[in-house]
Image (cartoon, rainbow, N blue to C red):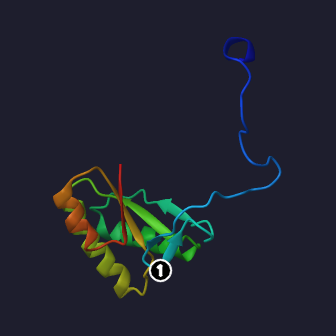
Amino acid sequence: RDAAFGELSGKYCESLDAVLRRPTRTVTAGPVKFGSEHPIVRQTMGTTSTRDVRGTIEQVMRCADVGFDLVRITVVGMKEAQACHEIREGLFKKGYDIPLCADMHFQPAVAIKTAEAVEKIRIN
């Protein structure tokens, strides 16, 4: 590689022996704070179909019970956006307030409907 492209210039990272986090701004999802000086957030992505409200509620509860701070769920269209409302309501009824993040492609109307039910939207 060095013969073809030359030696790497600069430092790849600050230290090979210690984890050093870059300064960032704080972002929130409900009560959970990301970045800056906050602890690393334990998050996972649900594998159920978001339209499967009961299955998604059960999976999110299992994730919360084992210590995840946030669960991401897939939102493809309006049916999943409506399901997010039912999922949030079902979680609250069972005493779970874990933040949800909707993973979706840019669709303004769907995002607005979804934003009413989840703490964070992640646009892919």
Give whichever of 1, 59 is nearer the camera.
1
Residue at 68% of width from left, 12% of height from top? 4
Q: Is 81 placed left or right of 65 in the picture?
A: left
- At mark 1, the secondary structure is loop
Residue at 58% of width from left, 73% of height from top? 67
Q: Which amino acid, by three-letter code, is at mark 1?
A: Pro
The image position of residue 76, as x and y in percent, is: 26, 53
Q: Is 116 placed left or right of 55 in the picture?
A: left
The image position of residue 77, as x and y in percent, is: 21, 55
Residue at 71% of width from left, 39% of height from top? 12
- The N terminus, quarter of image: top right
The image position of residue 70, as x and y in percent, is: 48, 69
Residue 111, quarter of the rendered image? bottom left
Label 1: few (<14), some (14–19) or many (≥20) C-alpha neighbours in 10 Å? few
Task: Give the residue furthest to the right.
Answer: 17
Determine whether 51 is above or below 38 in the image.
above
Task: Give the residue furthest to the front.
Answer: 10
Number of numbered callouts drawn: 1
Give whichever of 87, 14 is nearer the camera.
14
Determine whether 89 is above or below 11 in the image.
below
Residue at 50% of width from left, 61% of height from top? 44
Give whichever of 7, 71 is nearer the camera.
7
The image position of residue 7, as x and y in percent, is: 74, 22
Residue holding disc 1: 31
